[in-house]
Structure formats: structure tokens, C-alpha cells
Amino acid sequence: MNDPSRAACVIGWPVKHSRSPLIHKYWLERHGIAGDYRREAVAPDDFPAFLANLAAHGYVGANITLPHKEAALESSEPDARARAVGAANTLWLDHWRLRSTNTDVEGFLGNLDASAPGWDRFVRTAVVLGAGGAARAVLFGLIERRIGRIFLINRTIEKAEALRKVFGERVHPRPWSFLGDALATSALLVNATPLGMAGQPELAIDLSPLPSRAVVCDAVYVPLRTALLVQAERCDLTTADGLGMLLHQAVRAFSLFFGVTPEVTPELRALLEQDIACT
Ligand code: NAP
């Protein structure tokens, strides 16, 4: 059934940890599409040449993972999302033009919409932890949904201040010492740092200042149920996990590569949960 003339890939260095093939191959099979999705381990020095020959390698598009997301932006024609986020995670050939976007924005928004429907009707203030690539995508999404005030808390305050310059005055850079005050006035908390991920330090936060209606969202997905999400559930708060974000960011990429908009189903989620549990 595989037709190598319509194939996409994920490019990274290393890339063997990527779960994108599992997701895209599930959708290919589900939609009966003749096509393939592969991993490509490409070293940073070889990345520009690989992209320049994407079609010759047999690909109509590619997902991009670490450490190539910034280089991908520079080597392609980015849309407004990718430019604002400062990184491209999806590239596709459009009549021989290599275009790019950043689907982490809709990964974040799609996951929140599915996990906490209507969240953007009551969230006026949000807290975002971190000022890296994931935080940029989160900020883009929050501003697109017209969230009025965003406390951006980061260890290196200069990086948070730089993001205020990019995303505007709704973004309020603050140090970690301000977290308790920020939570007391916020209805959405987003962890966009690696804290709480397997092999990383814990995210030590007291969620008790959050209002009872608040939503807690974690970009980390290994482990699936992070200590942050466990605490949020104990406080009866609504949660949105990192796996949901990962699944939702793949939707538009698949549609750009294969021309069909797929769905994030419980069956697909279970497949990924099983895979993560085995790591
Ligand atoms: P990044 O660009 O390296 O940024 C990491 C951010 O976390 C920085 O702001 C950094 O602060 C902060 N940080 C790191 N270690 C810290 C520590 N020990 N204490 C306090 N702050 C710390 O990383 P990223 O690409 O944004 O990714 C962040 C997380 O999101 C990762 O776990 C990644 O796997 C996850 N993610 C998930 C998805 C998904 O689909 N679920 C998508 C994208 C990313 P400084 O500025 O001070 O260094």
C-alpha cells in the first residue's frame, strides 16, 4: 500500500525518539491513503542540503524537531505563525516553494479546546512558565484568543522581556518569586518548561492560590501524568496534558502533507499512551 512518491518525514538529530511516525502512519492507514512517513536523522551541518533536496529525497513535506527548528525557519518561506514563534516545525512543498509554519500553536489551542471547552470565554488572565520555543507558541495562541493579561514567568527574566517586545504589552514578564500572586488572579496555568519531565527537576508549585474554575495545562508528556497534573486533579481543576498538545499539533501537518484533515481519536491517543508507557 505504501507509495514512496507521497511521503513525509520527521527530521531531527537524534530522531529515533520521535513519535510522529506512529501518529501519521495511524492516520495514513485509517484514511486508506497510499503514502509513507519516515524518520530522517540529519546532522545540523547536512540540514540545509537535505532541505534543498527534499523532493529528490522523495518527500512532499517534513516535520522538524530539535535541533533544526530555527534553521528550518531560515531555510524556508515561513507564515506569520512561524515568524512570530521564531521556529518552524512543519515544512511542505507548495509548487516547488518550500513553505513553513508552526503547528505547536494549534497543538496548544486544539488540546485546550478539547480538554476545557469554552476556556477562552472565562480566562481573562493566564500564567505561562518558560520563555523558550513552546512558550512562544503558547503566547501566540493566547493572544490570538484575545486573553487580556499574561504573566510570563521565567528563570532568565531578560528572555521574558524579549518576548514582551515580540508579542506586545499583554505579556507581563515576572520572576518566579511572583508565581503565588500570579496564580491568585489567573484562570489558566501553562507549564512550557521541561520541569517535571522524566530526567528533569520537579516543578515544585503550590496550586492552592488558583481559583476553583482554573485550567492547568502541561506541555510535558513524559511522564503522561506529571506531578503538576496530579496536583491539579487533586484540587479538582480541569487539566490538559502534553500528549494532547502533541497529537493536536500533528493534525494540520498531516493535512498539508496528505490533503486530509484527520481526527485525534481516543484510539490514537491510547496507541501513544501505550508507547510512552514503554519508555
Ligand atoms: P526551550 O526552548 O529549551 O525552553 C525551555 C524554557 O524552560 C526556558 O525558558 C528555560 O528558562 C526554562 N527552564 C529550563 N530548565 C529550567 C529549570 N531547571 N528551572 C527553571 N526554568 C527552566 O524548550 P521548549 O522547546 O520551549 O520546550 C519546553 C518543554 O515543552 C519541553 O519539555 C518540551 O518537550 C515541551 N514541548 C511539548 C510539546 C508538545 O507537543 N507537547 C511541544 C513543544 C514543546 P531559561 O530561559 O532561564 O533558560
Image (spheres, grey):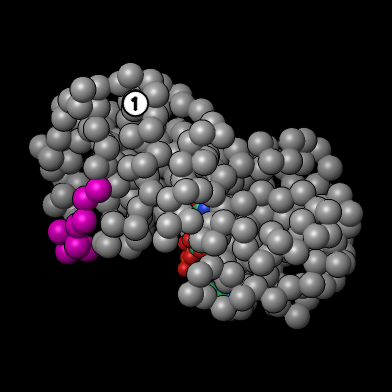
Amino acid under disc 1 = Glu
* On-image quarter of the C terminus: bottom left
Residue 95 location, quadrant? top left
- Where does label 1 land, which residue? 29
- Residue 111 seen in the figure: yes
Q: Residue at 77% x, 35% y: name it.
A: 118
* Above-or-below relation of 151 to 82: below
* Above-or-below relation of 234 to 72: below
- Residue 137 seen in the figure: no
Q: Position of residue 58 (x, y in %)?
A: 15, 35
Q: Residue at 56% x, 78% y: name it.
A: 201
In-image side of 49 versus 63 (left or right) = left
SS for callout 1 = helix
* Above-or-below relation of 163 to 140: below
Number of callouts: 1
Q: Residue at 46% x, 54% y: name it.
A: 276
The magenta region covers 39-46
